[in-house]
Every structure is written in C-alpha cells, then in structure tokens.
Amino acid sequence: MKKIYYLVTLLILITSCKQIDSKSNSENTLKIEMSNSIEGIIYNQLKLELDEAKNLDGIYQNHKHNENRKQILESIKIVEQVEIPKLDLIAVFYNYYVGTDIIRKTKYVKKEENNYYIFYKYFSSYDDDPFNNGEPKKGKELMKKIDNWTEGNKDIDWFGY
C-alpha cells in the first residue's frame, strides 16, 4: 500500500510539472520585437495587439480587429513624429483602417543605439510640465495635439480604447 501511495504521488508531481511547463511556454509566445525603424516598431506593436485579440474574440472591438487583421497591418501609416527634447523620446502619430473607419493612435518611442522601442509611460496634460523636461509650453502643446489627434476615435461607436 505504501508503494502505491508513493507511486501515485510521484505521478501527480510529474503531471503537475508538465502542465506548469507547458503553460509558461504558451505565455512566452506573444512578444514584441525591437526594430531598427519607427515604422517597424509600430507594426510589431500593433501585430502583438492583434495577436492578443485572437483569444478575446468575444469582445466586439477585438472581433472587429480580427475580421480586419490583414487590412489593419497593410494600412498602418506614420503621419508625424515629434521629438520630445531632453528625454530622447519621439511621439509617433499614426493611423490604420478597420473597415471604413480610420483609427488614430499615438505611441512614445525611444531610440537606443540602432533600435527603436515602445516606451510606456503616462504623461499627464494636467501637469505644469507634462514631460518634466523644462519646456512646459511645448509639452502642453504636444499633449493637446495628441488629444486632438485621437479625438476622432470617440465618434467610432464600436471603438472603445
């Protein structure tokens, strides 16, 4: 009886380890790769968002993105790039099509050596100096420009983020 108990315990442990290992492998399959161009890093970021949306098709926004995946990736257009002084950041204004709707977005991008990276940080337009770089007037103007750029997305009834 004791041998059977140890055998069952050992079998449970082995099975548990395989499940944990396979779960960690599937979590690592979605990733964003750096790029040597701004266009490339924006494309990679959007492709990652679309890959994540595949598993969440029950959310209408994701469903729309899944239906129009090819069109989205083929229609990405970088409209403007604004350098943010003293931070080595670039505010990238871009758009893409989902059906007949134009989605307008912005991302902050950082260049290091010969590669570009998405830079996630929240900058508040309510701060006196939004980028804390000693240029409050330019910072406020850029934040207003970003708000105006994405303002049109509010008119798209299915787009919520």
Image (tube, grey):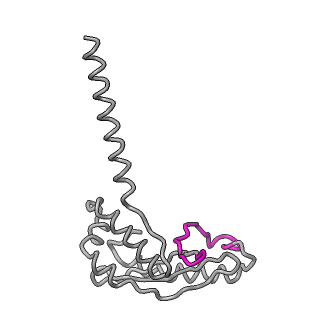
What residue lies at 47% left-to-right and 79% top-to-bottom? 150
Q: Main secondary structure of the magenta part?
A: loop
146 or 49, nearer to the observer? 49
Disc tally is: 0
- Magenta segment range? 111-131
87 or 17, nearer to the observer? 17
What residue lies at 31% left-to-right and 33% top-to-bottom? 14
Image quadrant of residue 96? bottom left
Single out the residue that lies furthest toward the bottom: 79
Question: Residue 103: x and y, percent?
Answer: 39, 80
- Please identify the quadrant where the C terminus is shown: bottom left
What residue lies at 32% left-to-right and 72% top-to-bottom? 158
- Is 33 rendered above or below residue 76? above
105 or 16, nearer to the observer? 16
Residue 126: within the magenta?
Answer: yes
Image check: 28 left or right of 80? left
Question: Residue 42: x and y, percent?
Answer: 45, 77
Single out the residue that lies furthest toward the top: 1
Image quadrant of residue 145? bottom right
Question: Residue 70: x and y, percent?
Answer: 27, 78
Question: Residue 121: x and y, percent?
Answer: 58, 66
Residue 43: within the magenta?
Answer: no
Image quadrant of residue 19? top left
Image check: 114 left or right of 134? left
Single out the residue that lies furthest toward the right: 134
Single out the residue that lies furthest toward the front: 3
What residue lies at 64% left-to-right and 80% top-to-bottom? 84
- Please identify the quadrant where the N terminus is shown: top left
